[in-house]
Image (cartoon, rainbow, N blue to C red):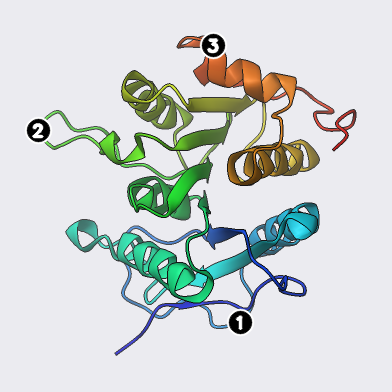
Amino acid sequence: MRRVRLGRAFGPEPTAVSGVVLLLPRGDEISYRRPAVLPAPPYVRTLGRRLTRAGRGEGLAAHVVRYRYRGWNGADATLVGDALWAVDEVVRRYGDVPVCLVGVDMGGRAALRAGGHEAVNSVLAIAPWLPEEDMAASPEPVKQLGGRRVMIVHGTNDERTDPELSFRLAARAKKANRDVCRFEVHSDRHALHQHRDEVLCLAEDFVMGALFGSAFSRPVADAFAAPPPLGLRMPLAAGFGKSLRR
């Protein structure tokens, strides 16, 4: 049987781990094929290295989750099961430490679904793939996100995943959990290449604040505090992060 596993930690693993990031890559809607064995997608690797450097002094460990299959696979939701296994494995390895799930594309949906695990204290979903809303079907769940810090980041010109669907999910989640915000990357597409540096800075700001209690930057703090829809359509300013100092 195929087994989910954790990739090797980015950089030198700290002597004492006090917080963990689990990176959930993209996937397909339906596929029982084996994922690529070798390196995680470049964007995920870049994100992992960036977060590891930022959190080295705090005892941060970051791992990519290696899925069993490429697909979400309908009711099987295989990526969610893999994400939950990965959180259990973190608890086994490192003990009672907070976990942040950082998902991209289909991995963003898996991160949001698996956010209810008791060890997870925060979720970052970047350009999350979400299903079309069907009035006859149950909507994507959000109750599991209660008590967690949640940030969604989405390009307004995303050609693969609909940003309006992530806004609707964020609006429903915000009703039950005030610690939800969403940033819009105006004019950017699914890969967020145009504002890559700003998105990486935003991810660092969120993870360091959510896992280790660092003060959020003013835009992030404002996004969490603002009532909907303002805090759920917060524009990511060009040059975000250049003036931040930790």
**Of callouts 1 and 2, the N-terminal one:** 1
**170 relative to 97, above or below:** above
Instruction: Judge by depth and name the residue closer to the eye, 146 or 94.
Output: 94
Q: Residue at x 52, y 25 (%)?
A: 181
Q: Residue at x 53, y 43 (%)?
A: 124
Q: How much space separates mark 1 and mark 3, taking CA atoms?
A: 42 Å
**Of callouts 2 and 3, the N-terminal one:** 2
Residue 191's x, y, as percent? 63, 47
Tag of residue 136: 2
Instruction: Judge by depth and name the residue closer to the eye, 3 or 161.
Output: 3
**Of callouts 1 and 3, the N-terminal one:** 1
Q: Nearer the viewer, mark 1 or mark 3?
A: 3
In the image, taking residue 165 as reference, residue 122 lies left or right, namely right
Image quarter hosting the C terminus = top right
What's the residue type where badge 2 is placed?
Answer: Ala
Mark 3 residue element: loop
Image quarter hosting the N terminus = bottom left
Please name the residue that numbered disc 1 is placed on.
38
In the image, taking residue 2 as reference, residue 125 lies left or right, namely right
Q: Find out whether the residues at labels 1 and 2 contact each other: C-beta distance under 8 Å.
A: no
Q: Residues within 10 Å of mark 2 (few under 14, many from 20)?
A: few
Please name the residue that numbered disc 3 is placed on.
226
Q: Residue at x 48, y 30 (%)?
A: 163
Q: Residues within 10 Å of mark 3 (few under 14, many from 20)?
A: some
